[in-house]
Image (spheres, rainbow, N blue to C red):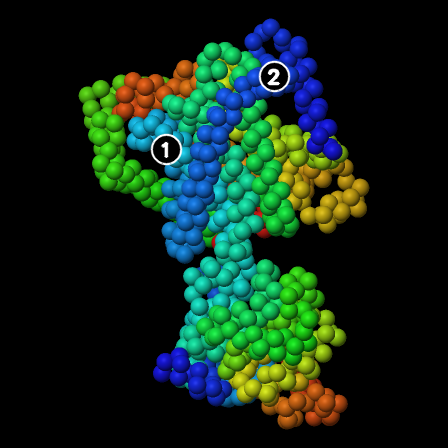
Amino acid sequence: MRHLLGALAILMLWQGAALLLEGRFLLAGPWDVARYMAEHAGLLGRALRITLLEAFLGFVIGNGAALILAVTVILLPRLQALIGAVALLVFCLPLVATGPILRVLWGPGIGPQVTLAALAVYYTSFLPLVVGLRAAPASWFDLVESYGRGPFTALVIIRLRACLPYFFAGLQIAAPAAFLGAMVGEFTGAERGMGVLAIRAMRALDVEATWALASLAAGVSILFYSALGAVGHRLFPDRPALILSAQSSAQPDNWVLGMLRAVALGLASLITMLLLWWAMMELGDVNRFFGKRPADIWHFLVTAPEAAAHRATLWQAAQDTLRYTLPGYGMGLALGLGLAAIFTLFPTIAAGVLPLAIALRAIPIVTTAPLIVLALGRGATGTITIVAVMIFFPTLVAALQGMRQAPGQVLDLFDSYGASRFTRLILAQIPAMLPAFFAAARMAVPAAILAVTVAEWLATGSGLGNLMALTASTSDYNMLWSSTALVTLLAGLGYALVAMVEKRVLAEMAPEQGIGP
Amino acid sequence: MSPRDMTEASAPPEVICRDLSMRFGRGKTAVQALQPTDLTLAPGSMTALVGPSGCGKSTLLRLIAGLEHPSSGQVEIDGDSPRRIRRAGQLAVAFQDPSLLPWRSLRSNVALARHLARLPKDREKVADLIAKVGLAGFERHRPAALSGGMRQRAAIARCLATDPRLLLLDEPFGAVDELTRRRLNIDLPKLWQARGVTGLLVTHSVHEAVLLADRVLVMSPRPGEIIADIPVPLGRLRNARTSLPEFAQTVAQVNAHLSQSAALP
């Protein structure tokens, strides 16, 4: 009932705003959107069917890959850090560049969209799977070992079953992400699908079509997210709150050793990435004009006569991108955190808002980017807003759920001293929230990069996103590969930076909440 | 000797620990969990190990099971490493918590031991054991629907489902209330005493140790070592004899060693 009222309130606000802004080509009200959908039901239906098919295939392939990776990590624990780091870097590959590259590799058809959908989901499924495959008491493994059986039996008898609730929680997040991957794939030169229609509508300034497509994408995402959530709730009533935890390893004795280990891991994953890159080009026998190798990029950026100019172009674009990314990232985190704190102080509001926030979190914001461009223009405001909104909802949900992790007994203790809500928030609820918040902040780094590059390409015409789109269309493949590598590197570094802060803060504030080795 | 030969050799094994010690961690934070220990468990005997919390009782049991690797010394079971008896499926360990898999029914949890030990399915045996531990009628229940005492009994039934030759019980009744524990102390030992197994029982209940074992070993606080070896003079199935003076004397003897070792300097 409350959900219905909330949805109704949103519809009324939306209609009101549309009436207010009438004639300014910004906002189509729900009435216009519904009419557009009814009039173009055939067209939208065909596009939706294609995009859903791509998303579904990507969903299956991506989650299958996540399962294989997670099982490998469990059976070969020594490789965990390296596999985790490389999996992250591949996840950080900018869809804006991988889209055109995959387009050339795959040729026409749905190949690139499916690949991008798979790339968009595998990492967020991999993380909870690794946690879930470990989520069993040690004595269960002792039991298996006491009958002389090894890790493989433990995997089959215990781990694969014990991880199901976690796997399901991952699937729930993956469903909207797969839809996002498929749509972004369609942005980059597909023949059919929702993404194609969205780009066309935005370029033609067709407000009704843009809003109708964005609403449809949002609605489908929320639907799948809620449906999977409901099924999961049915199957696993006591499933865990999903926190994409850091894969913390054993704490090193001192921080110098820790730093050395981090640097070694960084180098090892970098080398692995370069090897993978090279091997894929060589084994796939990809045309050298298009499929650049690491050595080509080294030549382009370092040893070529015009290398300095190339580096300057790249550096300028990177600066532009960071100028939008950092404020957007900060604002998204701050807004999510601030709103979560307010909702926690006034729990009656939170009870109504949390389901709504969880539903809105499912919307792949990037698929609605054309809307924001329409509303806020092609300048800095629009781009920063896209980044902030992309990060805002996951942060809000994680922070709200995290604050609920504060143990009831601790809250009772505060109440028994008549402590104020504010004291309770600062001393009990915010510390309890930190692990969930940092998990969200880490995952927000690749999300921010994705949002900013898509926005730059669709709207601002500056930054790395624009550079990648531009060089893809002018066949300047050296520059395309260089910016792709740079974006991936920046995302990986940003993630590592947040993880470092997280480790420090959690060691101080919440040592008992770290997931054990 | 192949595992099959060992299945046929169903006599209870002899367990010999030589100079066995265990140290966790290294450097300043290292903990000596077990002082070098020599110990022999006679074939077919039940030995109880009592001592204060954290004295290394469970560590010693886990070393014998081969679930931990000793820092020094070795464990020989019939002249071989623990690995062999484990691989032959002739070892059964009852852990401190019942360790039942929550998604399996009671019957399926008991049958799991036979599966893990690579023994053929035996529905009758499983049903019989479930009945013997007093859980008939609960075969289809999940562990969550059983009480703590029922889960402990289920774990014991699982232990016995493979006809083990070596039975290691790590506080198997630790998580149940005193009344249930007394009933389990009377009901369950009959099941393994009839079979001829070599056994080690870790407990911190002196009453339980004297009731169930042929011999009680007392361990000192950390770093643990065996400080007393007390034979229990009563015959087996002695639950009717707990009122005899010998029983009370043995309990008093064990208690004296325990309180002596626990006295603060």
Asked if residue A46 is positioned above or below residue A135 in the image, the reply reads above
Asked if residue B153 is positioned above or below residue A427 in the image, the reply reads below
Q: Which residue is mark 2?
A: A35
Furthest residue in direction top, as rendered: A23
Residue B173 visible? The answer is: no
Identity of the residue drawn at 67% across and 74% down: B136
Identity of the residue drawn at 68% across and 76% down: B134
- Per the image, label 1 sits on a secondary structure element best described as helix
Identity of the residue drawn at 47% across and 11% down: A204
Q: Amino acid at mark 2?
A: Arg
Q: Which residue is mark 1?
A: A111
Mark 1–mark 2 CB contact (< 8 Å): no
Between discs 1 and 2, the one toward the N terminus: 2
Identity of the residue drawn at 65% across and 93% down: B234
How much space separates mark 1 and mark 2, taking CA atoms?
33 Å
Q: Amino acid at mark 1?
A: Gly
